[in-house]
Amino acid sequence: MPQFNPIGVFDSGVGGLTVLKSLRELFTAENFIYLGDTANVPYGGKSKETISRLVNSHINFFKEQKVKALVLACNTASTLIGELQDPGFPILGVIAPGARAASKATQNKRVGVIATPATIKSGVYTKELLSCDPSINVIPVAGTMLVPLAEDGWIEDPITNLIVQRYCNVFLKQEIDTLILGCTHYPILKSSFTRIFGNSFNLIESGPAVCADVIKLISSEAIPANPISKPGTLVVTITDSSQEQFTRTMSRILIGQDFPEVIVL
Ligand code: DGL
């Protein structure tokens, strides 16, 4: 597998850019190709069969792009890890690393998970958290209305604050000390969560968590690292032709990083 081949990053929409940001901060010499399936977002209310069909078809795109590894920067897609086609390169999901990070962070063993309805319904977070530490009490909540707010860029908006507060009341009541933002769109709305929990609360995000697994992949030589002589490149693709809102939200997420023109597939 040539070292210059890109690492693929996939999400249903803009959310995976929060993961891409962390990856680019850490792996500055790697080339990345991002695909946001904006024609089909949101995935979170769809059936397992539909999500599986969509993700498998996008894995074919990454095969054509000859990626050396694929990060499923989408929790909803990551619930299917192990059930997807084997494309001949490693596929990393974000749920197991997020659960590991949360199990290390919690002191009182009360962990909240807010994620899409499909992710919550799959029960994968609960399973992963309990396999890290069977004494953890998991409090799962489906944040059904949050993805459209993030896609639309309703950041630091009073309406978003109210909706997030409503979802989080149960976490406050249950006295959790750690909350997994179990959808990669939710860090876009992070300020609404920190208003409730404060800045020093354990908010676990998929991006930093999955970076640990990419480090492992490279250091075990499962994939070759790009030489650090020059900065890596980035290609951003989406599946729907209306790219204005995507580009606007991307510029807010990738603040401080260069990003290219968005390509519509
Ligand atoms: N960003 C995705 C996730 O992490 C999916 C959101 C959606 O399309 O519903 O779950």
Image: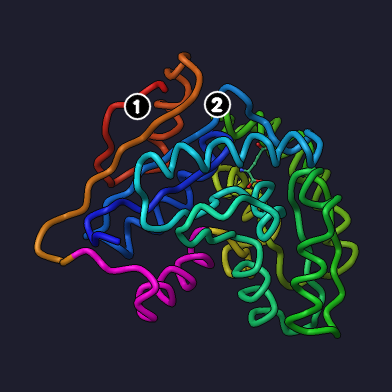
Asked whether 86 or 69 is in front, the reply is: 86
Q: Residues within 10 Å of mark 1 (few under 14, many from 20)?
A: some
**Magenta stretch?**
207-226
Assess whether residue 219 is covered by the magenta stretch: yes
- Coordinates of residue 185 in the picture (x, y in percent): 59, 43
Q: Which mark is residue 262?
A: 1
Q: Earlier in the sequence, mark 1 or mark 2?
A: 2
Q: Position of residue 132 (x, y in %)?
A: 73, 82
Depicted 96 relative to depicted 219: above or below: above
The reply, left or right, for residue 189 in relation to residue 249 is right
Q: In front here: 264 or 222? A: 222
Q: Amino acid at mark 2?
A: Thr
Quadrant in the picture for the N terminus:
bottom left
- Which quadrant: the C terminus? top left
* 209 is higher (above) or lower (below) than 105: above
- Residue 130 colored magenta? no
Q: Of the residues shown, which amino acid type is indicated by label 1? A: Val
Calculate the distance from the C-alpha at mark 1 to the C-alpha at mark 2.
Answer: 12 Å
Place of residue 251 in the rendered image (x, y in percent of width and height, measured from the top left): 37, 34
Q: Is residue 141 above or below residue 57?
A: below
Tell me what residue is drawn at x 33 percent, y 48 percent: 32
Q: Which mark is residue 38?
A: 2
Q: In front here: 103 or 59?
A: 59
Q: Residues within 10 Å of mark 2 (few under 14, many from 20)?
A: many
